[in-house]
Amino acid sequence: MLLKKATQLPTASELNGQLTICDLCIDDLFERNTGFQLDEMQDKFKDQQVLVTGGAGSIGSELCKTLAYCNPKKLVIADQNEARLWALKQSLSTIDSIDNIRFELLDITNQDALSYLFEKNQFTIVIHAAAYKQLPLLQENLYAACTTNFLATVSLAKLAQQHSVGTFLNVSTDKAVMPISYLGLTKRAAEVYLTHLNDQSINQTQFCNVRLGNVIGSIGSVVPMFIRQLENNIPLTITHLNAERYFIANKSVSQLLLEALWIDVKADTLVFSMMQNIKITALASVVKMLYLKTLSNDSDKGIQIIGLRSGEKLKEVLHYPDAQVTDTNNQNICIVKETALHTPKIDGIVSKLVAINHPSNTTQIEELLLNLVS
């Protein structure tokens, strides 16, 4: 198909008359050949016991489906959303490796449940995908963002160390770079803490952050919002005419996250080179071309500019300006080496955050988080 080979979003004239909604979905615009070889992955995972947190979420569920076909020795999928976890279990019920998969209904902020999970398993790999990710909502809920995105990550990392987990892969976000939102701030704090753990001489666990842009089709992302607006016959809302974001298909993310576990060098932070920086207006135009004619009311209500919201940037970046970006043995994965922060203060700040973390202390929480990442 034309779009699966595209290196950029097609124009309306390129789309018109060549494809219909029956031919593709919006994900096809962003899917790329990652070079993922299932037989090689099956060989690498055959002796691995893997924990995936947030395993029933948009990214986590696709990751777990891919991982399940890699036939790990054990796969434990943890999530607090009962309905989505049950749906994932049903979707995986017929695969050959189902006997090696466990589904844990678990809130990662529950320290007792988390500790028991590690006690009854011998994980060799942890993929930490659980997080709150909706930026506008988190701007009003710093306590929840800090508790889930940062402090739960700290607890999970400590347990990984205590139980000699080999690799801990933290799914992060481009919003963690020079953060101006609570989403970015809490995710950056998690990055800093895990990098700090890598610097400890006694550390046996390799911690690695993987920064993602926007995953097409994930819950709360812009494409499903555009489709809902078309269905409701209202204008597509965009924050700014020049707003840009990095995009990547969910299938590509799942494959590259698994590939990232096996790169040939140790790294604090990784990014995927196949993420595409796209203007939101261009994306909106293509969504309209693909979906508008399939609806009963195909009138185009146009685009409404609503302005940048609190915590939003005009453009995102994947690394700090002074970072060194180098290739790995996988052409789709790059290492980002950034200037190390002064680490002796980190453990003290974390202790203070644990002590004062309460919905009534958001001012102090913000100050401590800013101190941690500066």
Image (cartoon, rainbow, N blue to C red):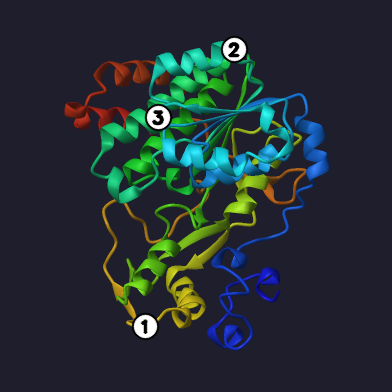
Q: Nearer the viewer, mark 1 or mark 2?
A: 1
Q: Is residue 309 left or right of residue 189?
A: left
Q: Quadrant of residue 155?
A: top left
The answer to which of marks 1 and 2 sits earlier in the sequence is 2
Q: CA distance from mark 1 to mark 3?
A: 45 Å
Q: Is residue 289 visible?
A: yes
Please report the residue visible at 61 percent of the width from the left and 11 percent of the height from the top: 202
Q: Quadrant of residue 81?
A: top left
Q: Is residue 119 left or right of residue 144?
A: right
Q: CA distance from mark 2 to mark 3?
A: 20 Å
The number of discs equals 3
Return the mark for residue 297: 1
Q: Nearer the viewer, mark 2 or mark 3?
A: 2
Please report the residue visible at 61 percent of the width from the left and 13 percent of the height from the top: 201
The answer to which of marks 1 and 3 sits earlier in the sequence is 3
Please report the residue visible at 43 percent of the width from the left and 62 percent of the height from the top: 224
According to the picture, the residue beneath numbered tag 2 turns out to be 163
Secondary structure beneath dot 2 equals loop
Look at label 3 and name its amino acid. Phe
Asked if the residue under mark 3 is in contact with the one under mark 2, i.e. CB atoms within 8 Å, the reply is no
According to the picture, the residue beneath numbered tag 3 turns out to be 150
Look at label 2 and name its amino acid. His
The answer to whether residue 187 is above or below residue 299 is: above
